[in-house]
Image: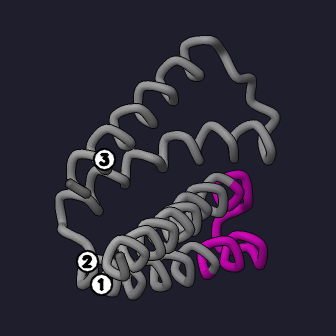
Amino acid sequence: MKSKHTSLKTLFALHILLMVYSMSGICSKLASSQHFLSAKFCLYYAAVILLLGLYAIGWQQIIKRLPLTTAFANKAVTVVWGIIWGTVFFRESISIGKITGALFVMIGVILFARADMR
């Protein structure tokens, strides 16, 4: 039972890490609206580098604990985070197509995770 608990903890950590990874896209988009090499531009890109650095270190820790196929399959969840961040930070609309796509991604990730835990 302990390995299943550890695996669930690792999956939760992976999803937090993927949320952090997706935040680098927010910073990139914010930087793109700034003048090149302005203070805000540099600040946003420093945040991108920091977030991607945290992600790289965390990813190495995750793949020590999970099969690589499981970790990569869960990476698709960043699509869902992209929809959420687009709505929250950039007031982008959520269409039926986006919701449908996000549901397909989530169903695929869940099915793969369940099959992998057997």
Kindly check if marks 2 and 1 are in contact, taking CB atoms under 8 A apart as contact.
Answer: yes
Q: Mark 1: which secondary structure?
A: helix
Tell me the quarter of the image containing the N terminus. bottom left
Q: From the viewer's perspective, is residue 42 above or below residue 114?
A: below
Q: Which residue is identified by label 2?
A: 63
Report the amino acid beneath label 1: Gln
Q: Mark 2: which secondary structure?
A: helix
How far from the left and from the top, in percent, is residue 38?
74, 73
Tell me the quarter of the image containing the C terminus. bottom left
How far from the left and from the top, in percent, is residue 39?
77, 78
Q: CA distance from mark 2 to mark 1?
A: 5 Å
Q: Which residue is identified by label 1?
A: 60
Report the amino acid beneath label 3: Arg
Q: Mark 3: which secondary structure?
A: helix
Q: Residues within 10 Å of mark 1 (few under 14, many from 20)?
A: few
Label for residue 85?
none
Q: Residue at x 25, y 77 (%)?
A: 63
Q: CA distance from mark 3 to mark 2?
A: 18 Å
Q: CA distance from mark 1 to mark 3?
A: 23 Å
Q: Residues within 10 Å of mark 3 (few under 14, many from 20)?
A: few
Q: Which residue is identified by label 3?
A: 114
Q: In the drawing, does residue 8 fall left or right of residue 70?
A: right
Which dot, 1 or 3, sits closer to the camera?
3
Query: In terms of sequence position, does the residue under pointer 1 or pointer 3 come before the other?
Result: 1
Report the amino acid beneath label 2: Ile
Main SS of residues in magenta: helix
Number of marks in picture = 3
How far from the left and from the top, in percent, is residue 109?
36, 42
Q: Residue at x 41, y 32 (%)?
A: 107
